[in-house]
Image (cartoon, rainbow, N blue to C red):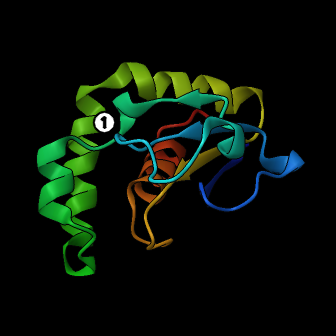
């Protein structure tokens, strides 16, 4: 059985069925308080590195290449990936992100990566 991993903008209200909420941005979201976000964990170590984020700049034309490069970064940094997979084995995980683009962002790419590397 595949793990239940979802993505959600940090600016959306937390819901009881979000499960374990993990912020996966490198930078704290603008204007967001800890109290409002309701994140259980800020795992910035799993976010794309600064050079990759700067290069991508949320340009959809670079999406496929961004995912490829990000997957290389994730493969080279297995500890935070394993931490997320362990959490997902216990129940629903919601990956929180601040990007405006809800379809092409690091949380979406990370979710795909986690699902492809899960044992479920």
Location of residue 66 in the rendering, given as x and y in whole percent from the top left corner: 22, 60
Pick the front one: 89 or 60: 60
Q: Secondary structure at mark 1?
A: helix
The residue furthest bottom is 61
24 vs 3, nearest the viewer: 24
- Position in image of residue 88 (x %, y %): 67, 33
- Number of callouts: 1
Give the residue displayed 28% in from the left and 46% down from the top.
Answer: 71
- Which percent across, then down, holds residue 116? 48, 47
In the rendered image, which quarter contains the N terminus? top right
Residue beneath disc 1: 74
At horizontal 21% and vertical 40% (from top left) the residue drawn is 49
In-image side of 51 versus 72 (left or right): left
Report if residue 3 is visible in the image: no
State whether residue 43 appears in this view: yes
Q: Is residue 72 left or right of residue 38?
A: left
* Residue at x 28% of width, y 70% of height: 58
Task: Indicate whether 87 appears above or below 110.
Answer: above
């Amino acid at each position: 059985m595949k793990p239940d991993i979802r993505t959600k903008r940090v600016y959306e209200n937390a819901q009881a069925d979000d499960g374990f909420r993990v912020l996966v941005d490198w930078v704290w979201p603008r204007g967001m308080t800890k109290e409002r976000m309701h994140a259980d964990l800020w795992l910035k170590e799993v976010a794309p590195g600064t050079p990759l984020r700067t290069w991508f700049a949320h340009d959809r034309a670079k999406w496929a290449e961004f995912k490829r490069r990000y997957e290389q970064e994730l493969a080279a940094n297995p500890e935070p990936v394993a931490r997320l997979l362990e959490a997902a084995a216990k129940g629903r995980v919601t990956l929180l992100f601040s990007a405006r683009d809800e379809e092409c962002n690091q949380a979406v790419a990370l979710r795909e990566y986690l699902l492809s590397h899960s044992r479920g």
